[in-house]
Amino acid sequence: MTLPLCRHCKAPLPRVFLDLGHAPPSNAYLAPERLNAPEMTFPLRLRVCESCWLVQTEDFTEADHLFDADYAYFSSTSKGWLDHAARYAAQMIARFGLGADSHVIEVASNDGYLLRNFVAAAVPCLGVEPTASTAAAAEALGIPVLREFFGEALGRRLADEGRTADLIAGNNVYAHVPDINDFTAGLAAALKPEGVITLEFPHLMRLVEFCQFDTVYHEHFSYLSALTVARIFGAAGLRIFDIEELPTHGGSLRVYGCHAGASHAETDGARAVLEEERRRGMDGAAFYTGFQARADAVKDGLLRFLMDAKRDGKTVAAYGAAAKGNTLLNYAGVKPDLLPFVCDAAPSKQGKLMPGSHIPILPPSVLNERRPDYVVILPWNIADEVKRQLADLAAQGTRFVTAVPEVRVG
Ligand SMILES: [Zn+2]
């Protein structure tokens, strides 16, 4: 077999970072009437480039099947995320003096959860969002939206039309673009000479530190360090001048970029993160060795807990039918005999089955009826919020469990 090539620097990729076997796409929730149909699975394998240290999914054939045209996630359904967006907008307006003469572009603007704050502050803005249903929701808020994928061609067109930006925001899109070079070239093309780019993405350093292998899924193409992003930026004529560490998604970075020749001074925050990554060896092979064994230990711990609970006659349910739950349950091979149901507050998922594991998804009210001995909270990043919501259950004796970075029974 010929080796796959790095999405950024095109070097061959002999080094496997993590292999989670085959799995269905993480958002391919099944309607019960589809249970007798075949289910598509794809290899879920990450490689790391020994030249630029980009951790990335492997390309595979028939990737078009990955994206369900009917599936759309509306960012505004999460209160915590709306608050995060409002704080971001206020910060950017204050720090970079944005006003009526400025122009803000958000790539992957979703349902307008972020740009609505710029509209409210009378800062002209433009969303880029290919998904029709979320783009329509943003337009209803008065946000102009280009219903397209972002890349170099669109960036150049915006420049030709005199629509370059003082601020380009990309929250949780950078790790999800298949062609990161083309996307970055688009950012450079659409940016004014003194403009600022901010990108938020989960920090690979935390993924490894806290063994968050369940955040790996097919649509999450790149797993990024600041060091690697600095290289990708450099190749597009951009540079990083500031970095903030954020608690979102188990530890994210917000990277601030500008044109290589712009006047923004490098901050202590940027230097500190880059230095910490070097100290941990993220620019060398050792950092990327041994992750598989740690992921396997987490998987084994979850299976041991579920099998012990079954043997002891205890009842177990799960909460949160999120993507990371699908990665974990499918890698562990958990089926309804060990985990009979999962509850989720999203009506669009209720009544369906988790892809691969075929565990039914029920409304959270079922937990109060059945009062299981244990509730496994699959989205560990919002475990505290879930525990608060389910406090009544805990008062009646239910115990909460999280599986990552190791099985913990609260
Ligand atoms: Zn590379």
Image (cartoon, rainbow, N blue to C red):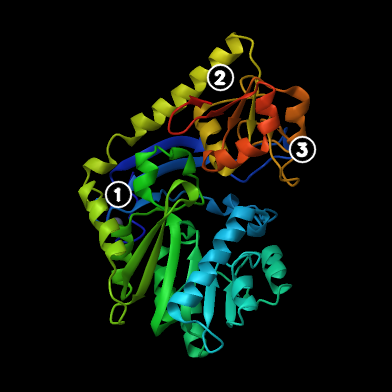
User: How far apart are labels 2 and 1 at the CA level?
Assistant: 37 Å
Among numbered discs 2 and 1, the one appearing first in the sequence:
1
Residue at the extreme top of the image, as rendered: 312
Q: Is residue 305 left or right of residue 394?
A: left
* C-alpha separation, residue under disc 2 versus residue under disc 3: 23 Å
- The disc, 3 or 1, on the residue closer to the chain's N-terminal end is 1
Label 1: element kind:
loop
Circle 2 crowding by C-alpha within 10 Å: few under 14, some 14–19, many from 20:
many
Of tags 2 and 1, which is closer to the observer? 2
Label 3: how many Cα within 10 Å (few below 14, some 14–19, many 20+): some
Q: Residues within 10 Å of mark 1 (few under 14, many from 20)?
A: many
Numbered mark located on residue 351 in the image: 3
Query: Residue 82 vs residue 45: left or right?
Result: right
Q: Position of residue 215 (x, y in %)?
A: 48, 43
Task: Determine the secondary structure under disc 2.
Answer: helix
Q: Nearer the viewer, residue 42 or 118?
A: 118
Q: Please name the amino acid that badge 2 sits on.
A: Leu
At label 3, the amino acid type is Gly
Q: Which mark is residue 306?
A: 2
Residue 134 is tagged as: none
The residue at the point 68 percent across, 70 percent down is: 138
Q: Where is ligand 1, by quadrant?
A: bottom left
Location of residue 115 with respect to 33 vertically, above or below: below
Task: Please tell me whether mark 3 sits on a helix, a strand or a loop.
Answer: loop
Tag 1: amino acid: Leu
Q: Residue furthest front?
A: 395
